[in-house]
Image: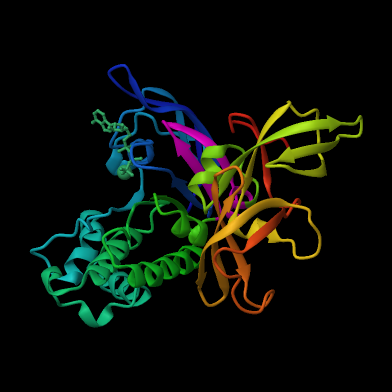
Amino acid sequence: MSVNVRINRAVKTYGNFRAVDEVSVDIAQGEFFTLLGPSGCGKTTLLRMIAGFNSVDGGEIYFGDRLINNVPAHTRDIGMVFQNYAIFPHMTIFDNVAYGLRNRKIPKDEIRERVEKTLDIVQISHLKDRMPAAMSGGQQQRVALARAIVIKPQILLMDEPLSNLDAKLRVQMRTMIKKLQKELGITTIYVTHDQEEALAVSDRIAIMKDGKIIQLGTPEEIYNRPVHQFVANFIGTSVFLPAEVVSQDENGEASIQVSGYTFRVKLGRKAPKKLKLSVRPKQFLFNDATDEGIKGVIRVATFLGDYWYYEVELTSGETVEVHEYTKEHEGARPVGTAVKLLLDLNRITIFNEDGTEAIR
Ligand SMILES: Nc1ncnc2c1ncn2[C@@H]1O[C@H](COP(=O)(O)OP(=O)(O)OP(=O)(O)O)[C@@H](O)[C@H]1O
Ligand SMILES: [Mg+2]
């Protein structure tokens, strides 16, 4: 049976250094949960604490109602998939997948049945008598996955399982993993530093930085409503522009100035004087009708099929990336053209000056 996982103020220290720093999160039964963040932020360390390969130096980790802080790894009932496959090179694929079941003293007939069924699920039945060396990276990773799920674990843990595969195979495999996870209904904790992969597979994502969770949310929440500049920068492309509040009335309606352009938005609370706007390439809108907007000159114009990719040098000296869908504008805006850019005011993110807090 799949279980929920509750992590309460978990800490892992190496000497004076906190690799995991008071992380708290509740992961629901059957959820596909992803730890996402740059190299060294503590993803693997936290996953290994959940697996039982790292000590828990503070806080608690529960599987369901069971406190597992001091439960040995091999009795935690987890399936684990690593980046480097970690399959046994001297055993056939069948034996690799059967290994965990044989250890559990499961009857022979049942082992055969379960291994065959699992190989079928990950679509490598036809390779069951092969040795791992005679298989591609993607096939080896399927073996590792089969080995992890054949034991019907309570929790499936995966640490960058696709990072050794080429781009196309990564996309295929992540689709398979997501489908499989939903079919089995198994609580899954997945580690990656690939933002697109995280968006594609996860029910919820935790963005980690320096051993802490900076934001927790669905892929859409993380992408559309980043709570910190770090998140806006890490997920997708954003440019950050300094802005100033000219005035704000008692209803929250504010006049904000950015690069000589003033616009009005309603803010949920009293804004500080100085702000930072986070704008994605498709949140800039060319204004062909009036003189209003952030002024700049097109420096690069590249046709990318669905949209034109522009680099616009603003009067302030900053260069921003702008995407305009080809169906919205016929042909290129030539390099050297002076343009005015409006902002998609419902979509841009407004931060405080140092980008540590979203104002709306
Ligand atoms: N055994 C150890 N001894 C000392 N420091 C360690 C040890 N293991 C990890 N660290 C440190 O803890 C921090 C987090 O490491 P961790 O491996 O969890 O990062 P990560 O987020 O998985 O990064 P990556 O994406 O590169 O795999 C790093 O600064 C790392 O150097
Ligand atoms: Mg890691």
Could you tell whether 161 is left or right of 237 in the image?
left
**Quadrant where the C terminus is found in the figure:** top right
Q: Is residue 27 visible?
A: no
**Front-most of residues 89 and 210:** 210
Residue 126 as seen in the image, left or right of residue 195: left
The vertical placement of 240 against 178, above or below, is above
Residue ranking furthest to the left: 90
From the viewer's side, name the closer residue of 239 and 302: 302
The quarter of the picture where residue 325 lies is bottom right
Q: Position of residue 310 (x, y in %)?
A: 55, 63
Is residue 255 among what the camera can see? yes
In the rendered image, the vertical position of residue 265 relative to residue 195, given as above or below: above
The span shown in magenta is: 203-223
Across and down, in percent, residue 332 comes to: 59, 74
Residue 237: x percent and y percent? 52, 53
Extreme-bottom residue of the structure: 126
What residue is shown at x 74% (from left), y 38% (from top)? 257
Judging depth in this view, the residue of 162 and 176 nearest the camera is 162
